[in-house]
Amino acid sequence: MSEFDADLYSDDDSVLVNARRRYIHRRWNLLHKAMVGSEEDVVKYLFLVNAGGAVAVLGFIGTGQLHQAVAWAGAALLFFVIGLLCVGALKTVVFHQYKRILEGFDSDQVSYLQGQMTWDQLNENDHSRSGISMAAIICGYCALLAFFAGTVCGGWALYDKYFYFKSFNFFL
């Protein structure tokens, strides 16, 4: 049993209150760091998507040799962009989820420290706010499906381009 666990089972009320305050402080710090990290991820992602999209479009402009292969490559690019947008939506949903958990915990811990809420209510409320939202699940799976669709289209574009040149060389 750790020192923290021993404090929770002590008969001394002041020791129990101090242990609970340390728990509240650690939990708040954990939630705050998760929210700040999530916010930084969203900003990095948005920069990456915009810069990557510009590079991809510029690179794609110069490859107009085979119309059918370019069409499949364009479809692959479209699916990859859709996947990136889904990942961005996922990161945004997760950020707002962390924010909601932090704000709820912050409000509850103030109520607990003012004697308006019991320790059990504080923990039950915190537990009820935690979990994965349906929006996060949908965004994650849509990003995965878009990646698979982009991979298939990209593979087909390479297949078309390779066999087009093979058949062209065969007839020469």
Image: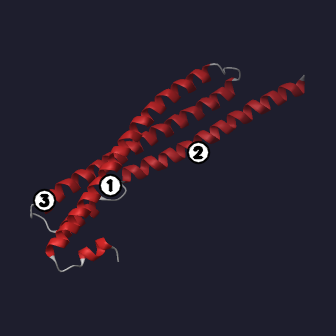
Instruction: Indicate the secondary structure of the residue bearing disc 1.
Output: helix
Q: Earlier in the sequence, mark 1 or mark 3?
A: 1
Total numbered circles: 3
Percent coordinates x, y for residue 107 in the rendering: 17, 54
The quarter of the picture where the C terminus appears is top right
Q: Residue at x 65, y 36 (%)?
A: 154
As drawn, the label of residue 148 is 2
Q: Residue at x 31, y 73 (%)?
A: 3
Nearer to the camera, 54 or 169: 54
Mark 1 to mark 3 CA distance (whole Å): 19 Å
Q: Give the left or right position of residue 83, taking residue 75 as reference.
A: left
Neighbourhood count class around disc 1 (C-alpha, 10 Å): few under 14, some 14–19, many 20 upward: few
Neighbourhood count class around disc 3 (C-alpha, 10 Å): few under 14, some 14–19, many 20 upward: some
As drawn, the label of residue 111 is 3
Read off the residue under disc 1: 30
Amino acid type at circle 2 is: Phe
Q: Return the residue found at the far left.
A: 115
The quarter of the picture where the N terminus appears is bottom left
Percent coordinates x, y for residue 71 in the rendering: 63, 28
| In front: label 2 or label 1 | 1
